[in-house]
Image: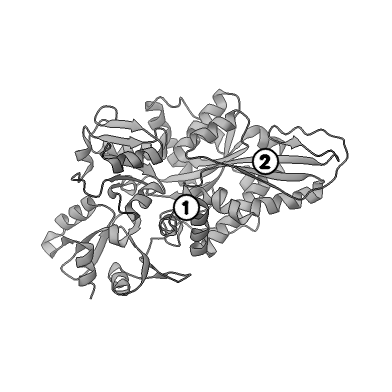
Amino acid sequence: MRTRTLAPALVLLLAPLTAACGQASGADGAKTVTVTVGYQSKTINTVTAGTLLRSLGYFEEELAARGKREGVTYAVDWQDYATGAPITAQMTAGKIDIGSMGDFPLLINAARGKELKQPTRLVSVTGYNLRGGLNTIVTAPDSTLESLADLRGKKVPTSVGSAADGTLVRALRRAGIDPADGIHKLNQQPSVGASALQAGSADALSQFVAWPGQLAYEGKAKALYDGAELNLPTFHGVTVREEFAERRPGVLDDFLRAQQRATAHLRAEPVASAEAVAKETGLPAEVVYLYNGANGIATFDPALRPELIGALKQDVPVLKDAKLVGDVDVDAFVDPEPLRRVAAGAPQYPLAAGARPELWLKGQTATQTYATPRELLRAARGADVRAAYVPDAETGTLWFADRAAWVAEGGGDLRAFVTAAGAKAYAERHKDSGARTVSYAEAVGLAG
């Protein structure tokens, strides 16, 4: 944890500090208000409200300006956690003011806040994927498991109550498997589950960004199921303690303005942003870019889009079935007013367009996009490639080209898929036109 102190200013010894997370300091009578922000540095589609925002210092800049106007010193205490659950615990204890987490944890945040009389509000979105591609089920690289049906009776770690758990539950149900007794589900932190998969004590792993991409990039896993096959939106967002939002609305506005600035920066400088997040987290920049890049799996926009709020309502029954929440009044939890207050002059982002193949060469500070996977592979052959990305031909989920499953068609087209099952199914449906699965090396050779 690290606290940044800003804009010292002397004030009269009147008006004692009443902030639950703030504190008075200094014998000279200076007043310091500490704003505590909980974030998940390695859950990288929260970066515009966490890692990237922190590294850019935008929130501190906004508070410094406020401090000068008010004669107050503001400080930010950034607290980093692996998942959303401890952030919720700290918020309901009155120890964290603003937090960011995924859609399923947001619902638990709403439920726990109401139950413990520390209500919270959802005030903005960080990153989203309208099809659900932020979550993935992976297996070991040499696993013989080929489909969800093969998971019957297998050990599958996930983080119960997370969006990744929601993906696992829904995917199993669609495959005709009871998630309660059809598999051995292990409730584990992402790092623990990843270690179990590598050690061979787990058969598959269902996790959220950026764990599946990181494991695939490092050659420690391959994708078994692309969450985008569910075609249900998933997202991460910002929640605030209601008491804090009502007592310090201006500070919340400053946070949302800073988030908007960080979002604009990420969109304008995606490679530099990926490098910055990588430096802060220790994640490979190539993995960060897979999710947060110009054509990345996550789209960043603070807007509380109706598609996302609708998806949140569909998540409630899943958590109720798991006995993690009771009824959750999503409409009461969602508060668009703070974002509306700071929206004047803010960028308006369209819905995400389809991803395109993208090539990142070593030593380059910009990437190149291509119209087709064939053009990408042709450009990559013989080049000093840092990373090559291709969208799944059906779900649109971006993936590493050399980790994707490939299909060659009779007409010369090359198509990439996140999973081998997806490639196999496509080839079977188009076998009359000569479609067949091929290796990455074969695809490169066929690119011409």
**Residue at the image point whose x is 76% and y is 32% from the top:** 18
Q: Is residue 216 left or right of residue 253?
A: left
Residue at (68% x, 51% y) in the render? 60
Q: Give the mark nearer the N terminus: 1 vs 2.
A: 2
- The Cα atoms of the two marked residues, 1 and 2, are separated by 26 Å
Picture quadrant where residue 194 is located:
top left
In the depicted view, which residue is nearer to us: 32 or 432?
32
- Residue holding disc 2: 35
Give residue 234's quadrant in the image: top left
What residue do we see at 37% from left, 49% from top?
133
Estimate the x, y position of residue 205 in percent, counting from the top left. 31, 41
Q: Which numbered marker is on residue 233? A: none
Do we see residue 273 in this rendering? yes
Q: Are marks 1 and 2 in contact (CB under 8 Å)?
A: no
Q: Secondary structure at mark 1?
A: loop
Q: Can you say which quadrant of the picture contains the N terminus?
A: top right
Judged by depth in the image, the label closer to the viewer, 1 or 2, is 1
Q: Residues within 10 Å of mark 2 (few under 14, many from 20)?
A: many
- Across and down, in percent, residue 284 comes to 43, 56
Q: Position of residue 202 (x, y in %)?
A: 28, 37
Q: Position of residue 96 (x, y in %)?
A: 61, 35
The image shows residue 144, relative to residue 370, as above or below, that is: above
Q: Which mark, residue 282?
A: 1
Q: Amino acid at mark 1?
A: Gly
Q: Is residue 173 visible?
A: no
In the image: residue 16, left or right of residue 206: right
- Residue extending farthest left: 432
Give the structural element (helix, strand or loop) at label 2.
Answer: strand
Identity, as a three-letter code, of the amino acid under mark 2: Val
Residue 75 picture quarter: top right
Residue 157's place in the image compared with 71, above or below, is above
Name which residue lies at 21% across and 71% down: 445
